[in-house]
């Protein structure tokens, strides 16, 4: 972790904060005036910079507000906490647009100050991770047809400011799509601000979105900018929009309609120059019918819709995604990346992934920590994946199928001679063996072979003929009749396949 930079000409303030932060295992670096800070920023690289900057307003060597402006020009994502006496509060609030993370009124309560700095550190680390993902790694991965459709949609929207609705199950990567839309839009130079409307309590969500004025409610000691103001000139991503409270939907509709809003407790309209991208895993049309979501807001948000497919609809992407996530996990943990065998990929491909891509990413992180060897084998996979693969492997041969209704005419045609071996009759769907075939084909495809069709066709024909011959006790003509092929054909196939 990078150090917390403290800027204050008062030695006692610096001393108290240094000791308290060191007790919390947070390193510090102190300065007495803004000039020293700017010199240090210019002299060092990004790795030597601060995690969070805590600065006083009034210092002999310059103003903390001027320092805020200059720091934001160099490091726009750096959280800056401004310490201010109550007499300075009004002037500090007037400069809130400069981008301060929060204000720390003097005299301050030390535990509350440390908690505020800790929140700023968490925000800084989230920004670093998001930025690293956007710059160092591919935005999104996928060769499946459904994902290619998503990529084409992002490309078509690259020069547009139109409102977009992203739909898809949890864990499919809706925020990644929103970030890609922002990155490739005319607003790419502005901020990208994301908020999960389902994760914030209803009574706090309004203030979180629109901000509040000083004194708007108990505990509102300073004016605070909401997410709309933070996203000025950029993109605001509203995740899980379907869970937004109904009364807040009305306020959001007003912002989208006329481009203005009011902070909580405010009387002056604030202009919002923001592109809104919304996302949901819910069926909003059904929510509208139930009266839980405003129909006019739905139509305002649903200008362009992008649907993200669940992972089970893009199984061919699993090998690529798994290898990518293993690389990312290894880099995060500072270890050598692990490799995954083709047989382990087959097992992964039989798993339904209810948590979608996010669940695959978590599994890869688990494997990086828990797998005993550098090459991941099927036995190293999490228990739920192993159990799913075992079930898929056995589901194609069921001795007892669930009872189903069979028409009388069809029932009269189904008979097995008592003297012949019992044979399982498939009265239900064939998803079991088809899933196995799909997994086997995937394993061969990812291995780089170019004879997959021939290899699987030979194995299929061999198994079919051998099963028919076992059923007829080796009588070829009878086996050919049951298979619906000619006797010359079965003789030729037995020779070609080496089944003599």
Image (cartoon, rainbow, N blue to C red):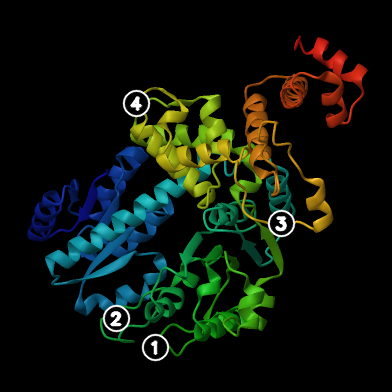
- Mark 4 lies on residue: 372
Secondary structure of the residue carrying numbered label 3: loop
Q: Which one is in front in this view, the residue at disc 1 or the one at disc 3?
A: 3
Q: Which quarter of the rendered picture does the C terminus lie within?
A: top right
User: N-terminal of the two: label 3 or label 2?
Assistant: 3
Secondary structure of the residue carrying numbered label 1: loop
Residue visible at 59% across and 84% down in the picture = 254
Q: Which one is in front in this view, the residue at disc 2 or the one at disc 4?
A: 4
User: N-terminal of the two: label 1 or label 2?
Assistant: 2
Residue 47 in picture, x, y percent from top left? 33, 38
User: N-terminal of the two: label 3 or label 4?
Assistant: 3
Residue 16 in picture, x, y percent from top left? 9, 58
Q: CA distance from mark 2 to mark 4?
A: 52 Å
Secondary structure of the residue carrying numbered label 4: loop
Quadrant of the image occupied by residue 221: bottom left
Tag shown at residue 220: 2
Left or right: residue 18 compared with residue 272: left
- Mark 3 lies on residue: 157
Residue 159 in picture, x, y percent from top left? 71, 56
Tag shown at residue 448: none
Q: CA distance from mark 1 to mark 4?
A: 58 Å
Q: Which one is in front in this view, the residue at disc 1 or the one at disc 4?
A: 4
Q: CA distance from mark 1 to mark 2?
A: 10 Å
Q: Which one is in front in this view, the residue at disc 3 or the one at disc 4?
A: 4
- Mark 1 lies on residue: 265
User: N-terminal of the two: label 2 or label 4?
Assistant: 2
Badge 2 local density, few (<14 within 10 Å), some, or many (20+)?
A: few
Residue visible at 68% across and 39% down in the picture = 434
| Residue contact at pointers 1 and 2, CB within 8 angstroms | yes
């Amino acid at each position: 972790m990078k150090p917390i930079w403290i800027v204050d000409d008062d030695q006692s303030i610096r001393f108290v904060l240094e000791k308290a932060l060191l007790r919390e295992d947070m390193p510090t670096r102190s300065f007495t005036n803004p000039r020293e800070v700017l010199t240090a920023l210019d002299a060092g690289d990004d790795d030597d910079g601060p995690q969070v900057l805590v600065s006083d307003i009034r210092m002999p060597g310059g103003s903390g507000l001027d320092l805020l402006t200059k720091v934001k020009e160099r490091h726009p994502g750096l959280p800056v906490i401004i310490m201010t006496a109550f007499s300075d509060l009004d002037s500090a609030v007037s400069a809130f647009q400069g981008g301060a993370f929060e204000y720390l009124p003097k005299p301050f309560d030390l535990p509350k100050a440390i908690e505020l700095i800790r929140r700023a550190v968490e925000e800084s680390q989230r920004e670093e991770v998001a930025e690293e993902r956007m710059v160092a790694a591919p935005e999104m991965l996928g060769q499946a047809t459904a994902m290619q459709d998503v990529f084409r949609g992002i490309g078509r929207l690259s020069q547009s400011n139109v409102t977009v609705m992203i739909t898809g199950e949890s864990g499919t990567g809706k925020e990644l799509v929103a970030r890609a839309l922002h990155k490739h839009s005319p607003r790419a130079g502005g901020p990208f601000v994301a908020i999960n409307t389902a994760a914030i309590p209803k009574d706090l969500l309004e203030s979180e979105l629109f901000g509040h004025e000083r004194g708007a409610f108990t505990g509102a000691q300073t004016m605070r900018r909401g997410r709309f103001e933070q996203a000025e000139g950029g993109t605001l991503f509203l995740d899980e929009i379907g869970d937004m409270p109904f009364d807040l939907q009305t306020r959001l509709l007003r912002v989208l309609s006329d481009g203005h809003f009011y902070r909580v407790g405010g009387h002056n309209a604030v202009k919002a120059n923001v592109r809104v991208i919304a996302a949901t895993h819910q069926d909003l049309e059904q929510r509208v019918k139930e009266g839980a979501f405003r129909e006019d807001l739905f139509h305002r948000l649903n200008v362009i819709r992008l649907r993200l497919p669940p992972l089970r609809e893009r199984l061919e992407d699993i090998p690529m995604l798994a290898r990518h996530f293993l690389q990312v996990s290894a880099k995060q943990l500072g270890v050598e990346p692990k490799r995954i065998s083709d047989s382990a990929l087959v097992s992964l491909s039989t798993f339904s992934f209810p948590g979608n891509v996010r669940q695959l990413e978590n599994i890869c992180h688990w494997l990086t920590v828990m797998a005993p060897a550098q090459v991941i084998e099927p036995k190293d996979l999490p228990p739920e994946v192993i159990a799913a693969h075992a079930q898929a492997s056995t589901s194609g041969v069921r001795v007892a199928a669930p009872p189903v209704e069979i028409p009388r005419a069809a029932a009269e045609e189904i008979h097995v001679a008592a003297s012949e071996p019992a044979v399982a009759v498939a009265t239900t769907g064939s998803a079991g063996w088809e899933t196995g075939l799909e997994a086997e084909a995937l394993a061969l495809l990812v291995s780089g072979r170019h004879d997959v069709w021939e290899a699987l066709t030979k194995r299929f024909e061999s198994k079919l003929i051998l099963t028919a011959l076992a059923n007829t006790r080796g009588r070829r003509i009878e086996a050919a009749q049951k298979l619906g092929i000619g006797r010359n054909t079965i003789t030729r196939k037995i020779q070609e396949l080496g089944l003599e």
